[in-house]
Amino acid sequence: MCGRFVRKATLEEIAEAFDLDVPGIDLELTPSYNVAPGQRVAAAVCDRGRTLKQFKWGLVPFWAKDEKIGYRMINARAETVAEKPGFKRAFAKRRCIVVADGFYEWQQAGKTKVPHYVHLKSGKPLGFAGLYEHWRSPDGRTLDTCTIITTSANALMRPIHDRMPVILDREACGAWLDPEATDPQILAGLLAPFDPDRMEAYQVGPLVNSPRNDSPECIEPRP
DNA sequence: CCAGACGTTGTT
DNA sequence: GTCTGG
DNA sequence: CCAGACGTTGTT
DNA sequence: GTCTGG
């Protein structure tokens, strides 16, 4: 699955990697080495040009009565996302690319869990396939939320965990964000495990366990 | 028909 | 154990 | 995802 | 809102 990640690239680097229309972007991006559910994440969307917006991580369906449901909607399974009531509408109309530099995955080792950091060999930012929603609370407040889609583990991830986030390369990002794309078969076909030869993973220390810790030490290899 | 859930993960 | 918060 | 709280009353 | 279960 995907429950914690890193976003440290500059806006310029992100814009280059995701072909963003920079003039339309009005967003503060401070690096985070420990982005957790419930926090603000940056995602590319198609909205009269390709831009970057902020969303609270944890999708709140538009029909929800209580925003707390978002804490249980941080991931959506690629296998079922097109049909599940909570995600169906977003899958059809509100797709996004959540921007990251890498992600953490915890490996069960007996009674304990060992965190690993996973990233691209190229060192470039990566994009998670995501969905977003706009929610209005009973008292009139609005909330923009999103979720990250997961798929089965590739060969690199399998020793660590049986699920991983869907990572889209540049071409797939274009297809995923295309508002004209309506064929659910084609869209679902993009949600495949990423090429393991273009990724690497290593063990990190327990600092990352607490979401309160947010420093470059989080991604330092465990000695 | 109405009521109640709507999710993923991991563990048992 | 289960929910909330980060 | 993991960490941390989990409750009410009455008094300061 | 929409689907499932009773």
Image (cartoon, coloured by chain):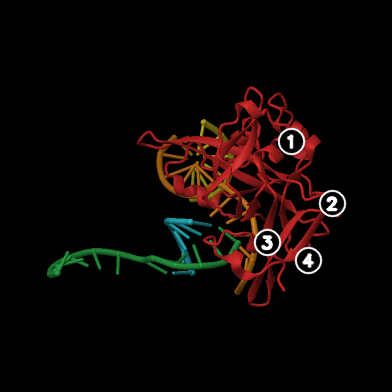
Chain colours: A red, B orange, C cyan, D green, E yellow
Viewer-side label of 4, 2: 2
Crowding around mark 2 (Cα neighbors within 10 Å: few <14, some 14 to 19, many 20+) is few
> Which residue is situated farthest in the right direction here?
A197
Can you see residue A157?
Answer: no
Could you tell me if the residues under marks 4 and 3 are in contact, i.e. CB atoms within 8 Å? no
* Residue A52 higher or lower than A4, as above or below: above
| Amino acid at pointer 2 | Arg
Q: Earlier in the sequence, mark 4 or mark 2?
A: 4
Q: Kindly indicate whether the residue at mark 1 contacts the one at mark 3 (C-beta within 8 angstroms).
A: no
Residue A11: image quadrant is top right
Q: Nearer the viewer, mark 2 or mark 1?
A: 1
Circle 4: residue type: Pro
In depth, the one of A127 and A86 nearer the eye is A127
What residue would you read off at disc 4? A159
Q: Which residue is mark 2?
A: A198
Which residue is tagged 3?
A219
Which chain is home to disc 4? A
Q: Nearer the viewer, mark 4 or mark 1?
A: 1
> Looking at the image, which residue is at 78% across and 62% down?
A158
